[in-house]
Image: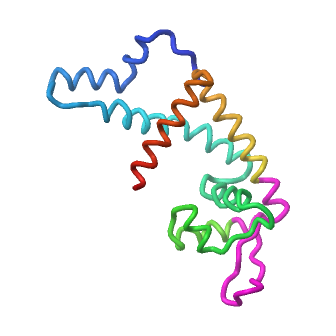
Amino acid sequence: MARQIASERDLQDDHVGVRRRQWSKELPDVDTVGMAILGRARWITLKVRPPIEAVFAEHGLDTGEFDVLATLLRSGPPYRLRPTELFQQLMITSGGLTPRLARLEKAGLIERPPSESDGRSLPVQLTTLGRERAEAAFRADMTVETDLLRCLNDQEKEDLGRLLAKLAIALDT
């Protein structure tokens, strides 16, 4: 999927590099370094979505459904969270979570057992099938993502990950 960069010149000839050169002629006083980073980040996100979404579709899931299952799986045994914990971790509204839960429950991937401590709340728990599906989809997704990054060497991946984390933390505060 990802290709090897032919030369350093390719790094300036992508769609963002072309736009930056155009802007530097038209408005030379405007700093376009934000475009160099954020424009490329947006383009990368749009480019990698289809192959990643295809992985989830192969496992009978959409991205939102996978996010629910993966969040439950990451939480560890007993793979159960309260709906409030789920939508906070997923960064969505409770209204956005409800239809996902309904689809996953209908598919037998989650169950809503009564809470032992709160009779008003129905926790969300992975079923055995849900756990198996989440794990298989995650493994396949990581294989695709590794392939998408193969044009970078190990040090470049580490550096890029560290720099993106620094930016993400700064934007989050």
Q: Dividing the image into 4 quarters, which one contains the C terminus?
A: bottom left
Whether residue 19 sits left or right of residue 147 in the image: it is left
Q: Measuring from the top left, give residue 161's x and y in whole percent.
A: 54, 36
Stretch in magenta: 104-133
Magenta segment includes 108: yes
Q: Measuring from the top left, give residue 96's x and y in whole percent.
A: 53, 68
Q: Residue at x 29, y 25 (%)?
A: 19
Q: Residue furthest bottom?
A: 119
Q: Residue at x 73, y 47 (%)?
A: 137
Given residues 56 and 17, the one toward you in this image is 17
Q: Residue at x 31, y 35 (%)?
A: 34
Visible residue check, residue 82: yes
Q: Measuring from the top left, give residue 72's x and y in whole percent.
A: 71, 62
Quarter of the view holding residue 155:
top right
**Above or below, comparing residue 166 to residue 29 in the picture:** below
Q: Measuring from the top left, give residue 13's x and y in whole percent.
A: 38, 17
Q: Residue at x 55, y 41 (%)?
A: 49
Magenta segment includes 30: no
Total labels: the figure holds 0
Visible residue check, residue 108: no
Colour pattern of the rendering: rainbow
Quarter of the view holding residue 67:
bottom right
**Above or below, comparing residue 23 to residue 72 in the picture:** above
Quarter of the view holding residue 1:
top right
